[in-house]
Each structure stands twice: as C-alpha cells, then as structure tokens.
Image (cartoon, coloured by chain):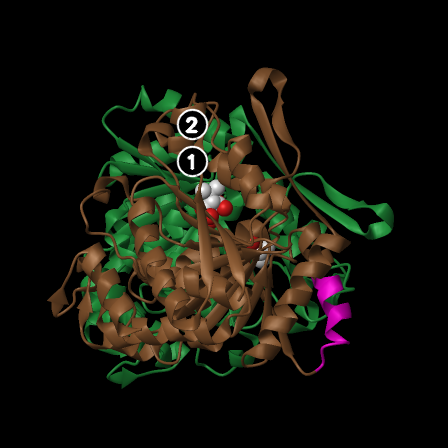
Chain colours: A green, B brown
Amino acid sequence: MPNFNIAVLDGDGIGPEVIAEAIKVLDVVADKFGHTFAYTKAPVGAVAIDQTGDPLPEYTLSLCKKSDALLFGAIGHPRFDNDPSAKVRPEQGLLRLRKELGLFANLRPVASYDELADLSPLRPERMKGVDMLIVRELTGGIYFGEKGRKDNGNTAFDTCTYTRMEIERIVKMGFVEARARRGKLTLVDKANVMESSRLWREITRELAQENEDVELNFMFVDNAAMQLILNPAQFDVIVTSNMFGDILSDASSVLAGSLGLLPSSSIGSTVGMFEPIHGSWPEGAGQDRANPVAAILSAAMMLDHLELREEASAIRGAVNKVLGQGVGTEDLRPTTKVGTREFGDRIAAAL
Amino acid sequence: MPNFNIAVLDGDGIGPEVIAEAIKVLDVVADKFGHTFAYTKAPVGAVAIDQTGDPLPEYTLSLCKKSDALLFGAIGHPRFDNDPSAKVRPEQGLLRLRKELGLFANLRPVASYDELADLSPLRPERMKGVDMLIVRELTGGIYFGEKGRKDNGNTAFDTCTYTRMEIERIVKMGFVEARARRGKLTLVDKANVMESSRLWREITRELAQENEDVELNFMFVDNAAMQLILNPAQFDVIVTSNMFGDILSDASSVLAGSLGLLPSSSIGSTVGMFEPIHGSWPEGAGQDRANPVAAILSAAMMLDHLELREEASAIRGAVNKVLGQGVGTEDLRPTTKVGTREFGDRIAAAL
Ligand SMILES: CC(C)[C@H](C(=O)O)[C@@H](O)C(=O)O
Ligand SMILES: CC(C)[C@H](C(=O)O)[C@@H](O)C(=O)O
C-alpha cells in the first residue's frame, strides 16, 4: 500500500480554507482507493514572515525537499504590496521555492466548462472548444537574471538570460505535452526584438526535427495576447519564457469565467508543487466564501503526477458532477449557492 | 495660411491603400479649412529592403527629420518572418525610426463604438464605457538594451535598462494625458520581480506629489492583462514600459472589435509619427478590402498634434457618421459593405 508524504503550505489569506477542502477530498480518495496520505504543514509567505521573518523558513524548505509532493495555497498580503520599502516580501518565498526545488515548468490548463459559459467575459461562440495548456518556464529569464542599480540609483536594469539547457528542457516538455493532447505546439516569443527569443526559436526548430508528429508554430507575444482574446480555441499547448508565461497564463485564466476553478502544477525535479492559480484574496479570508475547486483540482494534478491516474480522474468527475448540478460558491453565480466547506463536502460526497 | 510638410511612409502590404484614403480625407480638410499639406513619399520596411537593402534608407530618415509630421502605413512581410537567418528585417526600420526621431511615447486610444458592439469578442456589458489610452514608452527598455550571445552562442541575453530621465518624461506625459481625460493614471509594471519596475514606481510616486489632482494606482502586468479582459472600463490612462506596452496595447486593441479602426501616435520630439495599429496584411493587399479608418483616424491624431483641433474633430465626426450609417469594409460586418476606396470616399463626402 503506497504511502505518500505531502507537504502542505497553506500560505496567506484564503489559502488555509481552500487547502482544507482539497485535503477533505484527498482523504476520501485515500479511503476509497486504499492509500495513506501523510500531511505535514509548514508556513510560507506573509504568515511565515510574521512568525520567523523569512517568507521561506529553512524548516519549510527542508520539509518540501523530503516530501513526495507539495500542496500550496496562496501567498501575498496588501501590507507588503503597499510598502515600497519592504525588503522582505511574501513573493520572495515563492520564487526561492521554485528555484530551490528546481521547478522549471509551470503547467496551466484552461478549458471552458459548458455549464459556466455565462461567466466568461468572452462571448460564448468565442469560448467554444477552448482547451489549452500553457507551459511556462519558471526558474530562468528576467526573474532570476542579474539586476541592480547604477548612477546612484538613477538607472536600473534587469537581465533576461537563457541557456541552451534551460530552453531545451522546457521546450521538450512542451512537445511531450502536445503529443499527449491534440498535437499542436505554439512557441510564443518576441524574436523580432529579443536575442534570447531568437535562441528559443533556434533550439525549438532543432527539436522539431525529432518531433515531426507535433505541429509547431511560432507567434510573437503581442499577437498571442490578441489571439487569446480573439480566438483562444486555436491553441493546444503554448510554451514560453517566464515573463511572457506569467502574463499570458493570467490573461488566459480569466477566459473560463472564474479564477476559482483553475489549478496549476510546477514541476521539474522529483517533488512537484500543486497550487490554485488564484491569489490569497485577503478580504475574503475566514468567511467561508472562497471557491475550493482550484485547490481540489490542484490535488487532482498532484495525484496524476504521483501516477494515481484513476484517483485523479475520480476527483475531476466529482467536481464536474457537482458543477453540473448548478452548485457552487458565489463567484460561479450558481443556482444553489454554498460556502467553501459545503462545496467541499458535496464534492467529497460525489466521489 | 499654414503650410505643412508631411512625410508619407506607405510601407508594405495594405499600407499604401489605407494611406491613400487618409490623404483623400486630408485633402478635403485642407480645402475646407484653407490649409496646404505637401506630401512627400519615401520607402520603409520590406519595400525599402527590396529597393535599397536597408529598411530605413538614409533618404527616408532625412526626409522625416525635416518634415512637420509623418504619416506611416504598415510594415512587415512573411518572407522575413519565416527566415530566421535574415539579417535585415523590416521591423529594424521601424525601431531605428523611433530611436532616431526621439519618439519616446506611443499613444494608443481604445474606445468602444456603440454601433460596433457586436464585433467585440467581449460581452457587450463588459465593453460599456470603455475609453482608455495606453501610453507606452517607445525608445528604451529591453528593446534597446545590450543584447547578445555567450558560450559559443548557447546562452543569449537581453537587458532591460531604464534611466530616471527616460522614466520621468514618459510618466509625466501619462499625468498630462490623464489630467486632460478622466484624471486616472495606472502604472503597470512588475515591481515584485523587476528592479527597473521598482525605479518606475519610485519615480512615479515622486511625480505624484506634483500631480495630486490625478488619481494614481499601480498594477502588476499579469493582473493588468486579466483586468483588460475582465473590466476594461476601469482604465483611463495606462503608462508602462516598452515591452509591457507592446503586449497590453495589442491586447486592448482587439477589444473594440476591429483592429481596422484604431490609430496611434508616436511622439516625443518635434516630428510626430501617426500610424494605424494594424499590420501590413500582405494577403489582403491590392484587393480594395482593407479598412482605411485606422489610417484616417491617425491623420486626425496628426492634425491634433499640429494643433488643428477643429479639423481633427471634423474627421472624427465624419468617421462616426459613416459608421453610424452601417457602412463599412468587410471586417466591420456592416449592413452596407464597401471597399477601401468607397469607404474613404464616403468619409470624405461626410466632411
Ligand atoms: C507572485 C509573483 C512573483 C508570481 C510570478 O510572477 O511568477 C505570480 O504572479 C505567479 O504567476 O505565480
Ligand atoms: C514590429 C515590432 C518590432 C513592433 C514592436 O514590438 O514595437 C510592433 O509590434 C509594434 O508594436 O509597433
């Protein structure tokens, strides 16, 4: 009987509430399929700064390193966003975690739910058939390049650097994901301006020769930002750099109608990290209002990664069933409005 | 009687056709208001490469420098996009032109046309009241920073550098534009990751003290990409760096329903450049199908810049009138479909 050690990093705001529902659902799965999941909690983000002064305490990092997987809530608090002089910020914990764990790939699926078509900001005909995956490079580029000040602080610079190794591993993952889906890969870059983009194109063209079964195309990032709004159904898998991936994955995440539905995984080494894409929503915290589906579907992505595929699809089935009944938290404008906990209960029951 | 010398850079694809209609309309304005506009044409982009090997020939640049304003069509040809080894590319002409003429600010208005509400990819309720201006920095940042290769070409880098002077002049322009509109300015950046963004924030906070009548807020670029889709009406003026402005202005430009409607200006020194935001659409060239409105409204922005305000609003009035009659090119799905030339004729007649 397999036994999985799961590090649980609730984080800030609504993080603890949505993760609690994910664990509720995981416990039912464990029961039903005969697994044991052992959860260990550790602080990260603003709560970790308050407790220890460090957004990623040593204890948290070492726990993550020895776990089988990592379930992450959300981080961030307006207290830090509004303080430009803050030297320590919750986000630093997240960035260090990605780097230290070697999580070089962030995978973000976006699909339209027919039941929720009314929620999309796009017209229904534009959302038809939307089913894409953004593969974002997560530990390189301008996020981690050399940066600083010159001229007494009056000039600032950031460097976007990519090596062949960094590009190859993420683009390869893009080809693998595309092959497992509809066989289309789009490299998004700005090769008409950036030298690093030209290296991405070069390497991607080389890799295309070993991946001829996948249909490859190239798109400039400004055009991609338009196409995501005009015709998102054209995309299968998008692979792109850290910064472009940050922007495009957030843009595409609102198409489906609620951020509260979307999971993500960050992978690359042995431990994977699974996380709802929504933020910490501090104003909504502690009110039983947050949508737990993104966290629950993140748990499903975690099970897939642990090769518990049947278990993962059982969770997805339960979520779809409950959504299909018109049940949901307020953000979904459902026919039957429930709170965070009851939403989790119903999904657990539907298993 | 004022006399204006206008450099006309048709460029590639549909560039010449749409600019011809802008000139048709300008000629009626000249007649009606008693001006003389003298036009001088010069090559740029792919046609210039074909003629001279250079996307911005010396003759073109010196013509622009001694003109009062610059009317620009569009550039780009798939021949170059699909050739990674091309050393000379049409875009280089545009980038050099911006730098050489000191056009550090790109202004892109986006507003919803009630008559065309059906064309927007967004639901009509989301488009209500959309009326914004993106002020994009155009001659700095990662576009013009140091870039290159290391490790035998296997590592590539691009540098995003901003100086106090570069930031101050564009943010000041943002405050001026906001004051002339609804008094709201949003700085879009990635200050939780980029050092250059932190300098933008610092300087913007300083400038805010002399601009207390303008309501200022800050937004991360990933969030801005979402908000533009979720609730574009919240924005009045956005000010941002070159790369973020490239992405966000293209994203916002599709909201109104047709790229064929949107003008832009690039300003900063004495000569201003006025240009439709759409591309060169090579497949549509020479077929009398392109929408000339963006070029015509670019001519109106040019007149505003030359302080011919009454003349500029006469053009806008004529465009609105013809659009209100349900007349348009195919991209507008009009009740009365016309070609490029007839569309221009009708707008000229409505003057
Ligand atoms: C919090 C921030 C640093 C982070 C990022 O930009 O990567 C976030 O926006 C994300 O996408 O996970
Ligand atoms: C052609 C390209 C270099 C250019 C840019 O990125 O600035 C274009 O996308 C634009 O926005 O005018």
Question: In the picture, residue B350 is in which quadrant?
Answer: bottom left
Q: Is residue B238 located in the magenta-colored stretch of the structure?
A: no
The residue indicated by pointer 2 is B49
- Left or right for A254, reference B216: left
* In the image, farthest residue toward the front: B1
Residue found 47% across the figure and 35% down from its top: A192
Q: What stretch of residues is rendered in magenta?
A: B201-212
User: Which amino acid type is marked by label 1?
Assistant: Gly
Crowd tier of the residue under label 1, counting other residues whose Cα lies within 10 Å: few below 14, some 14–19, many 20 or above: many
Q: Position of residue A295 (x, y in %)?
A: 42, 63
> Residue flagged by tag 2: what amino acid is it?
Ile
B255 relative to B142, above or below:
below
Residue B210 is a magenta residue: yes
Q: Secondary structure at mark 1?
A: loop
Q: Position of residue A12 (x, y in %)?
A: 59, 68
B154 relative to A350, above or below: above
Answer yes or no: do the residues labelled 2 and 1 have beta carbons within 8 Å? yes
| Residue B45: image tag | 1
Q: Is residue B36 visible?
A: yes
Q: Is residue A46 left or right of residue A248?
A: right
